[in-house]
Structures are given as structure tokens and as C-alpha cells.
Amino acid sequence: MHKLFGTDGIRGIANEYPMTIETCQKLAEAIVVKFCSPREDRHSVLISRDTRLSGEMFKNAMTAILCSLGIDVRHISHSSTPELSILVPEYKASAGIMISASHNPFYYNGIKIFDEFGLKLTDVEEQELEKIMEQAPVLPRATGKSIGTCYFNDKCCLYRKRFENSLHLSKESAKNIKVVIDCANGHSSAALDGWLEEEFNFSVVTINSSPNGVNINENCGVIHPQIISEAVLHHGANLGIALDGDGDRVIVADENGRIMDGDHILALLATYEECEEVISTVMANFALEKYLSSIGVRLVRTDVGDRYISEYMQKSGAKFGAEPSGHVIIRSHALTGDGLFAGLKVLEHMLRLGKKCSELRLFEPYPTIQENVPITDRSVINEKSVQQTIRKFEKQLDGRGKLIVRHSGTEPVLRICAEGEDPAELQQLVDTLVQVILGNSQ
């Protein structure tokens, strides 16, 4: 069996390996072996999905196996990824399963797994699950009253309660505020339904909030930032918040339509909330690191993936972590990124400081050139000429920018990212490196 888990769980085109019914069933069995050791009381597992067409199919496949093994299953209808993360320990479940391909098109799907504490799995834990699946143990099926029961929760007030307790917004100061929220035709489309206006007293305009199973992330959400920019200007809003299909990523548009990504939100949190260090990944913009250094805050970089940020935060006690792509983890609220909460945290600071969103843009990112190079052989990155070229360009940019070359966790491509003050220089470096990679992959 090929390696199943990538940067963020298992992901692929629905009904093509690895995202098949058979994989889901084997994974459900492995989850029982790893997380549901024999005990007197019954184990339970939470399952949710986003709005894409294939979600119900995979949810039902995993539910059937879990119930057949005597595990109770609680369905959380169309929750966000952070909502599921929060609810797993609240319900004292043994594990949580989120069926989602995040920002990918509807014909993709994926599986993210959470442990009993609501944390994404470590590399070691994922390897253990893969090993169990390879061994294909024969598990005894439950009979009679031992068969698992399925519960359904259409609305979960526990998540909203946590949300409301963690966000500090004055209803009086928020009453003249207008916020546009791009729901990416995902879970948030059904989740908002007047709740924010009632609880926090600001006006909400939702866009891309009519999911039909195939339009999730389609020309909307975090991967299409121009949509939220235009919507903010059109509606004369104070703030725009764009999410992805499963709600764990966010970008913000200020009142002028300018985009603030995860780096900008992390800088904001580091500046106005007491902390000594914040966590990001190797993809964090070089200008962010320079800004944080200027205010005495240390930036720690991890591998790409919000779960690596979360792991480090648990070890170090850091309060904030974020990826430029929009996973923003605020530890006091949740152990994974919550796009809506992070976006409204920006609003909280706007109101508390009496500033416009544009005034909370604390640094200007260095120009970035990104390129995805299709590959069929992952070992091409280890070729001598490729490594020599990478080292040469890293040395050339040392102290003035950075070069990152890495495998995608979800696609058969090498991702190249170059940052620095001179876009022409960056483009030349990237073009040269792409040719070297392609020359070694033929």
C-alpha cells in the first residue's frame, strides 16, 4: 500500500485511490484498533463532513463499519473542521473524523482524524494507522445489543458557546459595523443563519452561501480572494472574511478591499496580545519575520501543515500560530484553525483599538513568486544538480529573502516559493530551477 496520509490527512479524487470506499472501511477498522481499546463502557466516534457531493457516501461507509464493531457514532451535520475538533473532547468521544478536502474542488474528498483531545494526528500516529490497515486484522463483529448506535446532531450549541465565550465584542461598538462573509458554499452557509447579528449586534452580508454539493470552493472563498475584495467594496463593508469549504482557513479584506492573509493576522495578534513567540511554517513571508523581530517577538517555523504548528504550540505553550494560507490557531479557543473565529478576532481588535482594518496592516510582504512543477517521480528533488541549484539560490537570497522547494501533500507536484525584494531576480531564479527540475524528471 502506498503512503496514504499527506500534509493534512488523506485526500484525493473521490472514488479513485486512495479516496475509495474500501480505504474508508479499512481506516474505520484501524481507528477502532488504535483508539477504541476494550473497556466496560461503549466507545463513541464523532463524524462530520462538508457540503461536497461524495461526503454522504464516505460518511455512511465509515459509520457502517464503526457500528458493526460496536462503536456508537454521532453525526454532526455539516460542521466545520474546528467545530468537530472542539466537540470531540466535549462529547468525550474516542476520536473524530472530518470528511472534507478543505479548499479543493468538489470532486476531491478527504479524511482528517482527531484524537480524543481534538488534536490532529502526529506523523507517528498516522504511520501506526497505515500499518494496521496493511496488516488487515480480522475484527469480531458486534451482535445483538452490542451493535453501535447512530446519533444525529443538527445543531450543536456547545461550539457556539465556546465561540461566544472566546470572542470579546462590545455590542454597542459593533452596532454600526458591516461584515461580508464568503462561505465558500461550505458548512458556514448553514451555520450563520442570523446567529452573529443576534449575538454580536453587527450587520452580516453572506455570499456564496448556497451549497449544492458541487459548488464548494468554486470561484469563491480563500482561494479566490478577489471575490471578497469586490464584495467589501460593493457593500461598503468595514471588513470582509473569506473562508474555505470546511471553515478552517481564512483571509480578510480591509475596507479598501486589500487582502490580509494568515501572516498579517499573526502579526496583529503578536502585536496587540502579550506573547514572546508565535508559530508559523517555512512558508511564512520573510517580511513577517523581520517585523516580529522589530517588536521583540520570536518567530518559530515548522514544516508545512497546521498540525505541525499545533503540535509545537502544545509543547511550547505558545498562544498563537498561523500559516500564510489562512490556518490561524488561537490556542485559548481551539487546537486547530478556526477561520470564522480568526476573522472576527480581527474585528475585535478593530473595535477595541478604534481603528479601521486597513490600519491593522502592520507590514508589507516581500514579493513572492510561486510555481508548481508537475512530477511523476518524487525522488527528482534529490538529484545532485537540483540540490546544487537549490543551495546556490538559497545562498544568493540569504538575509534578503528565502527559497522553499517542497513536495505537495495533496498533488503530484513540487512547489517552489521564492521571496525577496527584487521580483525580477526571483522570477529568474524560479525559472532556472524549474528547468533544472524538468530536465531531471524526463
Image: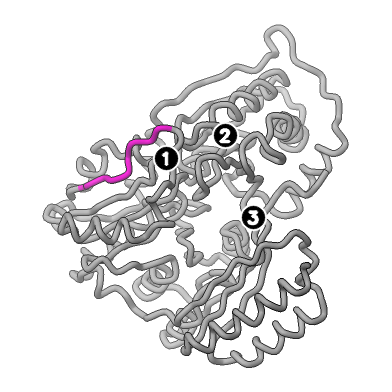
- Residue tagged 2: 92
Three-letter amino acid code at the position of disc 3: Glu
- Quadrant for the N terminus in the image: top right
Q: Position of residue 246 (x, y in %)?
A: 47, 44
User: Decide: marks 2, 1 in contact (CB < 8 A)?
Assistant: no
Q: Nearer the viewer, mark 3 or mark 2?
A: 3
- The quarter in which the C terminus is drawn is bottom right
Q: Callout 1: helix, strand or loop? A: loop
Q: Pointer 1: residues within 10 angstroms few (<14), some, or many (20+)?
A: many
Question: Which label was assigned to residue 411?
Answer: 3
Q: Secondary structure at mark 3?
A: loop
Give yes or no for contact between labels 3 and 2 (Cβ–Cβ under 8 Å). Answer: no
Q: Can you tell which mark lies on residue 215?
A: 1
User: Which numbered disc, 2 or 1, marks the residue closer to the eye?
Assistant: 1
Rendered image quadrant of residue 398: bottom right
User: Which residues make up the magenta segment?
Assistant: 204-212
Quadrant of the rendered structure where residue 275 is?
A: bottom left
Label 1–label 3 contact, CB within 8 A: no
In-front residue for pair 271/226? 226
Q: Residue at x 65, y 34 (%)?
A: 15
- Is 98 above or below relative to 416? above
Left or right: 225, with 390 as reference point: left
Q: Callout 2, which amino acid? A: Lys
Q: Earlier in the sequence, mark 2 or mark 1?
A: 2
In-image side of 13 versus 292 (left or right): right
How far apart in space, not on screen, are marks 3 and 2 (Cα)? 35 Å
Check the image and tell me how it is coloured.
Answer: one colour
